[in-house]
Image (cartoon, rainbow, N blue to C red):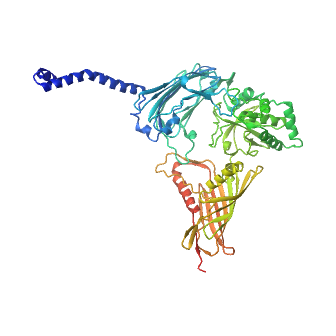
Amino acid sequence: MIDFLVQHCKKCPILAVLNSILTSFMRIFPIIFFLICATFTHAQDLNNSALFLDKNLTANANAVVRLDEMSVEIAGISEMNIRYNRIVTVLNKLGNKHTHTRVGYNNSVKVKRVEAIIYDALGNEIDKIKQKEFKDVSAVDGGTLYSDSRVLYLDYTPVQYPYTIAFTYEVFTENTANTPSWYFLDGFLVSTEKSRYQITFGSRELKPVIKEKNLDGIAIDRTETDNSITYLATDVKAVKRESLSPAFSKIAPKLMIRMEKFHYEGFDASVKDWKEMGEWRYDNLLKGQDALPEATATKARLLVKGVSDDLEKAKIIYKYVQDNTRYISVQIGIGGLRPISAVEVDRVKYGDCKGLSNYTQALLRAVGVTSYYVVVEAGSTKVDFDDDFPDLAQGNHIILAIPYNGQYYWIDCTSQVHPFGFIGDFTDDRKVFVITPDGGEIIRTPAYLNEQNYQKTSAHYALDRDGGISGKVTINTGGIQYDNRFYVERETPEKIEEHYKNYWDNINNLKLKARHFENDRKEVSFTEEVSLEAVNYASKSGNRMLFAPNAFNKNGAVPHRYRNRKLPFEIERGFLDEDQFVIQLPEGYLIEAIPKASEILNDFGAYTMSVTYRKEDHTLTYNRRLLIKEGTYQKDEYESYRAFRKEVAGLDNAQVVIVKSDL
């Protein structure tokens, strides 16, 4: 066809024009085609385009980890090199936290290189960030006096979504005890396309111990040679958080890695169990740090003069530490694990959890009381130490255990407000690592179970003819409910008023008239007395008024509904609420309807409620009891639990109807 046009173009002006156009197009077409292919091939080769992501990976995901790769090389007992490569496509602003563009370092961890490259949705490179452009900040909070721990991090603000970040770093350390663990998923609502972890070791005696956790249902290839172990996982779908689902750390697919023979800040170690780990930590990290100035030791002995009971001595010393020291983050010493000396804490009157615990232990020893240094994974989520996996990576906090009459009393030396022996929900009911001069062992801290976490609310309030209420409420709490409420006594008046308005948000126009608090630290009991009033609590309809007799402890929380729940559910801490409210009815009104007495009993707890009328003084008495039991339950039981809580919420909102008398 083209040949035909060429032969006849001289005879036809139109064909001549077409010939010119076709000739020009044929000249530039290869260039256009090359540019398109080059752009497409470049993006595809780097695996950084967001256009072709698998829908199975974007479902329920705020980010997709395209590649998560770590190579750990243990060349010798004191030689560890780590190379890390990560590519993440961020789908929306909630996915920004999964870029993980940061690396920590200190005097013992040297950063050899760090770099990041940013791509747009098409895979075009839009920025390249060198190490000198990363922010370099302290790894601890602003209250720290001194720390050699620092973080290099990229502070990137995206201009559009999706975008992709490729991040790499390499570090070297002599501390082979800090062998990094590995997670195949970052957390809820993030998926992983490819995850690879490899560890190589210079000799068989340096072969690490690896513990696999929660790998069921994930496609993972494990290969092992004489000097390496490699794990490869692909296409790990995102997990959606569900109401009452266990903490992600409990269900996360991960590897725990430790060396039986390792080096740590100048010390070699060979550790096979927790007993040996305790011996090593005591001999190398704790011994000698508990020496006190003689003047301070004498002062401690004077504080307990005339007291023979060791537990009473411990209470006196604990209060002295609370009154005379303050907590501050100080990451100094051997890798952040050796406490600063008791002499130094005594001089400056502050310390971190390690320093204050060591200082308290030194004071206790000065008065003849034995105590043990305890490593715990602290936080509101209960996390256990692994009984069969002794390593230094577990634990983020230090407390003390005091043996007395066959049991342990536990104290958190960083708290200036908690009663002696009460550790609250920060370190309760979990396996911890107790270090003694003879070695270490795993022991569980006290659990505050169900009825121990009580709240008793009593009230006497009057309902007036306009629907307003006024009266006095008394709340007494213990256990974890004490821990949740006793802080209010230290708040400002403005914060206190805000607290009660939020707590009683079912009462509009609430006004606090007076309040009084009593904190019984010996019995670990907190009492709140509040006088209040509110207008228009009851709803008026003609001659009738409707109101919920449960004005002060409605439990209206109903867990979310799921058509196809995926995860088990967990109630970490049970509780018991008991309520009794006496309600003075307005003169001239008669009872038309009151809620029927109800009782519910099941595996999750129990609920009872009743309303009775006393004609002699024209009052109603409302009695309620709600018990929720802690426990972990199968996903198939969730709907039954939800139905239970829904029924409780409905009964808590049950109405009394009174009508104006014609007399």
* Left or right of 303 on screen, residue 656: left
* Quadrant that contains the N terminus: top left
651 up-or-down from 175: above or below: below
Where on the picture, by quarter, is residue 440? top right
Foreground residue, 115 or 610? 115
Does the image show residue 83? no
Residue drawn at 23 percent across, 22 percent down: 24
* Left or right of 265 on screen, residue 539: left
Does the image show residue 10? yes
Residue drawn at 73 percent across, 26 percent down: 284
Position of residue 496 measured from the top left corner of the image (x, y, whole percent): 67, 52
Foreground residue, 276 or 319? 319
Outermost residue toward the right? 306
270 up-or-down from 588: above or below: above
* Quadrant that contains the C terminus: bottom right
Position of residue 130 measured from the top left corner of the image (x, y, whole percent): 52, 23
Where on the picture, by quarter, is residue 437? top right
Outermost residue toward the left? 11
Position of residue 214 measured from the top left corner of the image (x, y, whole percent): 54, 37
Position of residue 48 measured from the top left corner of the image (x, y, whole percent): 43, 29
Foreground residue, 32 or 495? 495
